[in-house]
Image (spheres, rainbow, N blue to C red):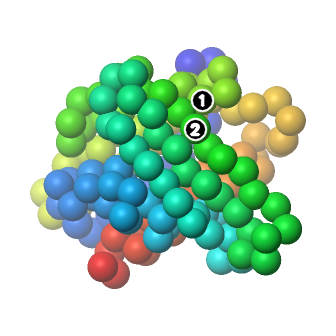
Amino acid sequence: MKNEIKVSTTIQADVKKVWDYYTNPKHIVNWNFADPSWHCPKASNDLKVGGEYKARMEAKDGSFGFDFEAIYTKVAEGKEFTYEFGGRTANVKFHNRNDQTEIVVLFEPEKDNPVEMQKGGWQAILNNFKTYTENN
């Protein structure tokens, strides 16, 4: 990946729970948004090479929304996956740190928005994930 952006967090939970909460649609809808004024009303995930990930992200007031869709190109159960979306790729790794799990996301930036804005958005989603996982 060229000029990739890295975001990460460490979650106070074992890797099995973190993997499940990150990949299971019943959990994805509870954390997959960058701002409290947004939500993720639906998600689906076929977690295998060639499988499709879909998540709807939209403003709670209905003023804006979009579908995030990706195709998996690599899946190592409980450890990492890579997917392609909109001509770009992202890799998500799960590092077991005893009773904690570190998630590292590397993704290719798009050209329309500043890198810092993209990094901030992806990090905010990861922070939501951390909060949701640690509190449920």
Q: Quadrant of the C terminus?
A: bottom left
Give the Cα distance between marks 2 and 1.
Answer: 6 Å
* Residue at the image point whose x is 72% and y is 51% from the top: 66
SS under mark 1? strand
Residue on which the image places disc 1? 85
Q: Is residue 20 above or below residue 7?
A: below
Q: Is residue 9 left or right of residue 100?
A: right
Query: Which dot, 2 or 1, sits closer to the camera?
Result: 2
Could you say where residue 54 lies in the image, as x and y percent from the top left?
A: 52, 44
* Residue at the image point whose x is 13% and y is 57% from the top: 98
- Whether pointer 2 and pointer 1 mark residues with C-beta atoms closer than 8 Å, the reply is yes
Could you say where residue 15 lies in the image, as x and y percent from the top left?
A: 20, 54
Q: Is residue 98 above or below residue 90?
A: below
* Residue at the image point whose x is 23% and y is 66% from the top: 13
Q: Is residue 25 left or right of residue 55?
A: left
Q: Nearer the viewer, residue 33 or 53?
A: 53
Residue on which the image places disc 2? 69
Quarter residue 115 falls in: top right
* Residue at the image point whose x is 63% and y is 24% from the top: 88
Could you say where residue 51 lies in the image, as x and y percent from the top left?
A: 39, 29
